[in-house]
Image (spheres, grey):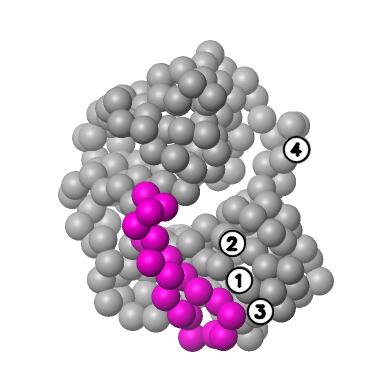
Amino acid sequence: MYVNADFSRRLIVTPDAYHWVASPQPGVKRMMLERLGAEQGRATSIVRYATDSHFPPHTHPDGEEIFVLSGVFSEGNAHYPAGWYMRNPPGSSHRPSSAGGAVIFVKLRYMKASEQESVRIDTNDAAHWREFAGGAVCALYSDETERVALVRLDARVPLPYGRAAELFVLDGELRVDGQGYAAGSWLRMPEGDHAEIGAGGAGATVYIRTRGPAEAEAA
């Protein structure tokens, strides 16, 4: 299955275009943002857990990235409310569940085999944020090919170097080339797309993943 697999053009998915589909597990539905391959293929999705739903224990051969959007997401006896960011490295395993329901943003099979550390960051903790002119940033992950962060914007901020980028609006309104996008909007920019990015009048909080040339070419 291929969903939004053309990485050469700008792609935007807004909440009014969400189409939830059932996962292999009862009580868990997905909104597919991009997908390359079958059930075990590379994918970016919004996943919705109903009350008392779960997946059986399983392994992620190429890793998994998670950001909790709402509710409480659990892995065994560890519980993560909205605002937690996680990276489960290649070869890791878990039993994901939610007692009260949760919605998460998930990326599967994007990690390099060399990535071996588990990451857990509570972005609600002010200690993880640093201010800059026009907003604040919470660094989540960085290596030679990608950077992942949450950014709070109160002024126009251009994408760095025109690199390929992925954005998910968490709060407020993001404006791209003058067009406004509400919370829940997902945007994917190709290499060389020098978009003008800023926030609406009330500001915006955005997940941003920028990629260097090596990974962009691999996509």
Q: Quadrant of residue 16?
A: bottom left
At label 3, the amino acid type is: Ser
Q: Quadrant of residue 158?
A: top left
The image position of residue 75, as x and y in percent, is: 71, 70
Callouts 3 and 1 close, C-beta under 8 Å:
yes
Left of 211 or right of it: where is 28? right
Q: Residues within 10 Å of mark 3 (few under 14, many from 20)?
A: some
At label 4, the amino acid type is: Asp
- Choose mark 4 or mark 3, whichever is in front: 3
Left of 18 or right of it: where is 202? right
Q: Where residue 125 is drawn, which disc sits there?
A: 4
Is residue 158 positioned above or below 209 on the image? above
Question: What residue range appears in magenta?
Answer: 14-33
The image position of residue 195, as x and y in percent, is: 28, 29
At label 2, the amino acid type is: Val
Outermost right residue: 77
Label 3 residue SS? strand
The image position of residue 111, as x and y in percent, is: 46, 60
Outermost front residue: 16
Q: Where residue 49 is drawn, which disc sits there?
A: 1
Q: Residues within 10 Å of mark 4 (few under 14, many from 20)?
A: few
Q: Could you tell me which residue is drawn at 18 percent across and 49 percent down?
A: 8
Label 4 residue SS? loop
Residue identifier under label 2: 103
Q: CA distance from mark 4 to mark 3?
A: 28 Å
Q: Nearer the viewer, residue 165 or 124?
A: 124
Q: CA distance from mark 1 to mark 4?
A: 25 Å
Q: CA distance from mark 3 to mark 1?
A: 6 Å
